[in-house]
Image (spheres, rainbow, N blue to C red):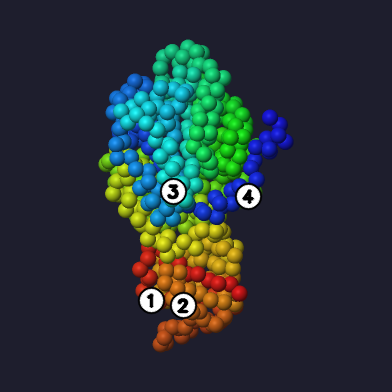
Amino acid sequence: MSATNLSLLNPDSERKNWFIHDRFGMIIHFGLYSLHTQGAWYRSRQELPHEHILKYFNQFNPDLYDPGDWARRARRAGMTHMTLTSKHHDGFCLWPTKETDFNVSNTPYGRDLIGPFVEACRAEGLKVGLYYSLIDWSHRDFAIDPFHPLRNIEDLESYNAKCDVARYQAFMKAQVTELLTQYGEISHFFPDFSYPRATHRGVSGKGRDYWDSEGLLALVRELQPNAIVNNRLDLLDLEADFYTPECFVPHEAPLRKGRPVDFESAFTMSERWSYNRDEESWKSPHQLIRVLVDMVSMGGNLMMNVGPTGRGILDKRTMAALDVYADWIELHARSIYGCGRSPFQAPKDCRLTQNGNRVYVHLFSWPYKHLYLEGLGGKVAYAQLLNDASEITWLPPGRRVLGEGEGLQGLDQDDLPHDILVLQLPPVKPPVEVPVIELVLK
């Protein structure tokens, strides 16, 4: 497809206005790996044959599955869209696909998981997203590559010679067609992922040509014209609807050809994507709030991951983390929704977001009595703490904060520049995880 025609695969920017406004979503990793609790990459890390995970397939029975509870907790936490792993790299499908028997209908559970998930999202007013792995280690036509569990078998070349890439592409498109035609409107489509530069034993990774990414994206645009699609199809000549840094806070807003892009960073509550009974590396309440604020302050989104148990419920650690978001967002939602980067400079240990004439100062540490904001002197009409709407005052422009007694003798006492705003803070930090000061500009 030519670059000109490729541009037709880009949606109208208006179609992602909700995404840019809402800023906060959830991704759910749920599948056979919820039983063995070793993660979706378990087969690859251990180089295990497909037969090894069939015992989990034969035991998969999430009898307490309640996506309504997931959706209610997500909504209360301030999340506005939910994305479910319809199929991960192991190839197990959460819907009764006609393209493979390796799906939920053939497990003890025996019925569709995606339909109830979609209904639960809509009941809570959440937009629906579906994750779909481009990788499928269970499919015989998926050639061995650097991440494949069988990458070190002796007869690698003869194995790959029997793989039919056209047949695999048809398989993927048939599954994507099922997903995008059977469940109503899908707002957020997350194909995962491309790795063309990886190499191992003379075989390369996979990218746009192997997936037929242009054809796959054209299919998505045809079936769900309003869906937004990530950047993981390896279509480097095409600006993606959104970009997906994963599990790290960028030093600055991601750029493409020198200008900012829309992005959504996926994070985990612990160090695992899927449920792990023994995991102890859970993020603190402060870290949970901070990563959300960090992303929005750079003009991006956060998609926080949860991993339900093998019985289909959220464990107490996950619920506690969601409660952290719920308690904070209840009082601070307007510093997140509709906000983005601010042109003003943030003080040390602070982040700024802005929506129109309102600037939000998020304080990761609470300073003693005064906060200095460069470039805002003389520009603020009103200031208040967002959690309780209590007024925050400031010194007249140019006024230096003076100490008491004789401790300043011999020091320069020049007035501050008039463009520095000096807020006068209460001595005790407000009783919220990350306090926010709302500045109303003149």
The first of marks 2 and 1 along the sequence is 2
Q: Residues within 10 Å of mark 3 (few under 14, many from 20)?
A: few
Q: CA distance from mark 4 to mark 2?
A: 37 Å
Q: Which quarter shows the N terminus?
A: top right
Q: Which residue in the structure is indicated by mark 1?
A: 427
| Residue 156 at x, y percent in the picture | 45, 16
- The kind of residue tagged 2 is Glu
Q: CA distance from mark 2 to mark 1?
A: 14 Å
- The kind of residue tagged 1 is Pro
Q: CA distance from mark 2 to mark 3?
A: 38 Å
Q: Which residue in the structure is indicated by mark 4?
A: 14
The first of marks 3 and 1 along the sequence is 3
Q: Which residue in the structure is indicated by mark 3?
A: 123
| Residue 198 at x, y percent in the picture | 51, 29
Q: Which residue in the structure is indicated by mark 2?
A: 391
Q: Residues within 10 Å of mark 2 (few under 14, many from 20)?
A: few
Q: Are marks 2 and 1 in contact (CB under 8 Å)?
A: no
Q: Residues within 10 Å of mark 1 (few under 14, many from 20)?
A: few
